[in-house]
Image (tube, grey):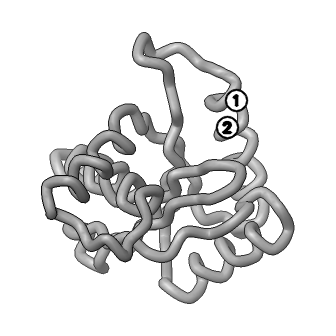
Amino acid sequence: MRVLALDYGSARCGVAVSDPTGVLATPLEPVLRPAARDGRRRLIALVSELGVERVIVGLPLSLSGADSAQTREARRFAAGLARGLDGIPVELYDERFTTALARRDLSAGGASPRSSEDSRAAAHLLSGWLEQHARH
C-alpha cells in the first residue's frame, strides 16, 4: 500500500511517500500554502498521481501530549483534505520530534540538502507510521 505523509504548516507542507511495499519513505517537494485552494488541489493531485491509498497528517502535540493551536489547525486541515479525497483515509499521527530528526539528518550528512526540512520531517513521520503498522 502506498502512503503519503504530510508535515502540515500553513505556509508550507512537507510531503513524503512510501514505496509500494510500504517499507521506504521518500521526501518530495513541499506544497506551498496547503490549506489554500491551489495547495489543496496539488495535494489531491499527488494522491491521484502516486496511487496513494492512505494519507497521514502529522499531529503536532505538545511534549505533554496536549493539544495546542497548531494541533487544532492540523486537525481542521486533515478534515478538509479528507472531504476532497473521495474516501481515501486521512489519519492523524503524532509528529513530535520529526523536525528535530530532519535537522539532525542534514547536520550529520544523512540527507540531501536539496530536500526540504519539512519534507524530511514528513519522511520521518511516515517511517514511524510504517514501522508501527508493520508490527500489526
Q: Position of residue 29 (x, y in %)?
A: 50, 75
Checking the image for residue 97, the label placed there is: none
Q: Position of residue 93 (x, y in %)?
A: 45, 40
Visible residue check, residue 1: no
Task: Please name the residue shown 26% across and 73% down the image.
Answer: 112
Q: Residue furthest right?
A: 37
- Please tell me whether mark 1 sits on a helix, a strand or a loop: helix
74 to the left or right of 50: right
Q: Amino acid at mark 2?
A: Arg
Q: Residue furthest bottom?
A: 49
Q: Amino acid at mark 1?
A: Arg
Task: Please name the residue shown 67% across and 37% down the image.
Answer: 75
Q: Which residue is mark 1?
A: 72
> 118 or 51, which lies in front?
118
Q: Which residue is mark 2?
A: 75
Q: Residue furthest front?
A: 107
> 74 or 33, which lies in front?
33
Q: Position of residue 37 (x, y in %)?
A: 85, 68
Task: Please name the residue shown 69% across and 77% down the image.
Answer: 42
43 to the left or right of 5: right
Task: Please name the residue shown 60% across and 83% down the image.
Answer: 48
Q: Quadrant of residue 67?
A: top right
- Alpha-carbon distance for marks 1 and 2? 5 Å
Q: Are marks 1 and 2 in contact (CB under 8 Å)?
A: yes
118 to the left or right of 40: left
Quadrant containing the N terminus in the rendered view: bottom left
Visible residue check, residue 100: yes
- Position above or below: 28 against 49: above
Q: Quadrant of residue 2?
A: bottom left
> 106 or 127, which lies in front?
106
41 to the left or right of 61: right
Within 10 Å of the Cα at label 2, are there few (<14), some (14-19), or many (20+) other Cα atoms?
some
